[in-house]
Image: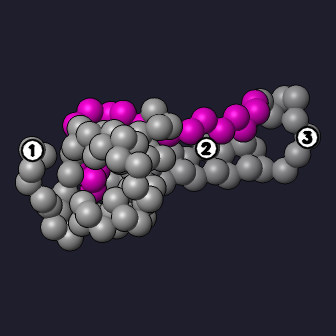
């Protein structure tokens, strides 16, 4: 990013956003003034500050591709011998045509 201004709609890598956020931290400017000077939106600055501060560091991806680890949901045991509840039919759409189907009778 050495002196090159990127216009509206341009894509920046995580490395470029880290550099831009460091530049903002040391600028002493308000978010609005800094964003105007760098030709970026305040929403993008806030978004990337949140992504990078929460450990969302999955390499040098472009803005459109965000790697996030899936969350874990504990559904308890599905052992029908210990449970006297009705049938459970659970379908999880994992994307790309992959569906996980769990049934408890």
Residue tagged 3: 84
The quarter holding residue 19 reads top left
Residue tagged 2: 102
Tag on residue 61? none
User: Which sits earlier in the primary sequence, circle 2 or circle 3?
Assistant: 3
> Of residues 28 and 93, which is closer to you in this image?
28
The C terminus - image quarter = top right
Q: Nearer the viewer, mark 3 or mark 1?
A: 1
> Of residues 74 and 60, which is closer to you in this image?
60
Measure how far apart labels 1 and 2 are at the Cα level.
Answer: 53 Å
Dot 1: within a 10 Å radius of its alpha carbon, few (fewer than 14), some, or many (20 or more) residues? few
In the image, residue 3 lies at what x, y percent? Answer: 9, 50
Q: Which of marks 1 and 2 is in front?
A: 1
Residue at disc 1, secondary structure? loop
Residue tagged 1: 2
The span picked out in magenta is: 56-78
Q: Report the residue that reaches farthest toward the right.
A: 84
């Amino acid at each position: 990013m050495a002196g090159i201004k990127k216009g509206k709609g341009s894509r920046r890598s995580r490395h470029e956003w880290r550099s831009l956020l460091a530049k903002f931290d040391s600028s002493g400017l308000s978010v609005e003034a800094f964003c105007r000077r760098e030709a970026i939106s305040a929403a993008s600055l806030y978004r990337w500050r949140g992504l990078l501060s929460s450990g969302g560091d999955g390499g040098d991806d472009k803005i459109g591709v965000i790697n996030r680890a899936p969350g874990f949901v504990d559904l308890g045991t599905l052992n029908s011998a210990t449970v006297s509840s009705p049938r459970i039919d659970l379908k999880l759409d994992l994307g790309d045509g992959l569906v996980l189907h769990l049934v408890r009778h």
